[in-house]
Amino acid sequence: MADDSFIREVNEELRSDRVKAIWRRFGPLLIGGAVAVVLGTAATVGYQYWSESRASQSGDRFLAALDLARQGKNDEALAALSELEKDGYGAYPVLARMRAATLTFQKGDAAGAVSAFDAVAADNSVDASIRDMARLRAAFILIDTGSYDDVAKRVEPISTDGNPMRHSAREALGLAAWKAGRTDDAMRLFQQIADDNGAPPDIRQRANMMLDLIRSSGAAAQG
């Protein structure tokens, strides 16, 4: 029993010495790693707070600009949006560009609005869906102020099957074709919308209305 007790004490001492040796060798690394994790977590939380704070501030400024526009203070709204475009955070600079283009059109400057939307559409740093929306906005302005080719240049690429914005693109093309006297093209485009079960109800309703209008006018037979 005494021998067993002596051996057990020796083994415990050896284990203790090994633990001490391992700790002397790897302890600083373990502590450093733990500190790095804590600092990394703190940095992440800090960045999220800073990011959310900046986004919140930009959001407040964007809403303030929209309020100015609703009050009819378009020049002041445009100035506020221009500042937000320069130093805003997150998606707000491009949203400011889109809203500023809309205000430009509402002020009667169709050419300036189209140019502003075209600039967003050509900016590869902007999300693709917003670029497509800018193309659509320019196209709908050009239905009244431009030619069929002007409209087609912007939205034909997004009118293909599978594109989530194809319905609006086809509607713009259909209206431009009808205005240009291209009745067959207009009928084809509106029929594509009417036959597309994925089209939003309001767009399908307008497409069917246009089909009825064209047929009742006798333009389809002439086309």
Image: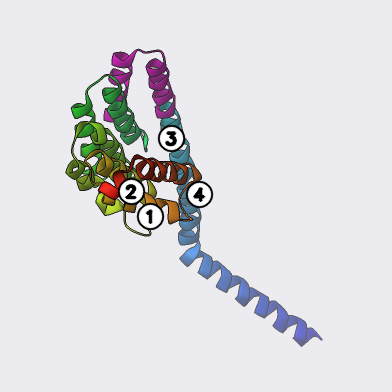
Give the class, few, some or many, for how many residues have Cα within 10 Å of label 2's Cα (few <14, many ≥20). many
Find residue 222 and report its horizontal and vertical position in percent. 26, 47
Give the class, few, some or many, for how many residues have Cα within 10 Å of label 1's Cα (few <14, many ≥20). many
Are the two marked residues, 4 and 3, in contact with CB atoms closer than 8 angstroms? Answer: no
N-term mark: 4 or 1: 4
Q: Does the magenta run of residues contain 134?
A: no
Q: Is residue 19 above or below residue 91?
A: below
- Left or right for 28, reference 15: left
Q: CA distance from mark 2 to mark 3?
A: 43 Å
Q: Residue at x 41, y 13 (%)?
A: 71
User: Disc 3 vs disc 1: which is toward the camera?
Assistant: 1
Q: CA distance from mark 4 to mark 1?
A: 58 Å
Which residue bears the numbered disc 1? 192
N-term mark: 1 or 2: 2
Which residue bears the numbered disc 4? 38
Determine which of the numbered discs, if any, sits on residue 170 in the image: 2
Q: Amino acid at mark 2?
A: Arg
Q: Secondary structure at mark 1?
A: helix
Q: CA distance from mark 3 to mark 1?
A: 48 Å
Secondary structure mostly seen in the magenta stretch = helix
Q: Is residue 107 above or below residue 181?
A: above
Q: Residue at x 27, y 33 (%)?
A: 141
Q: Secondary structure at mark 2?
A: helix
Q: Is residue 174 above or below residue 30?
A: above
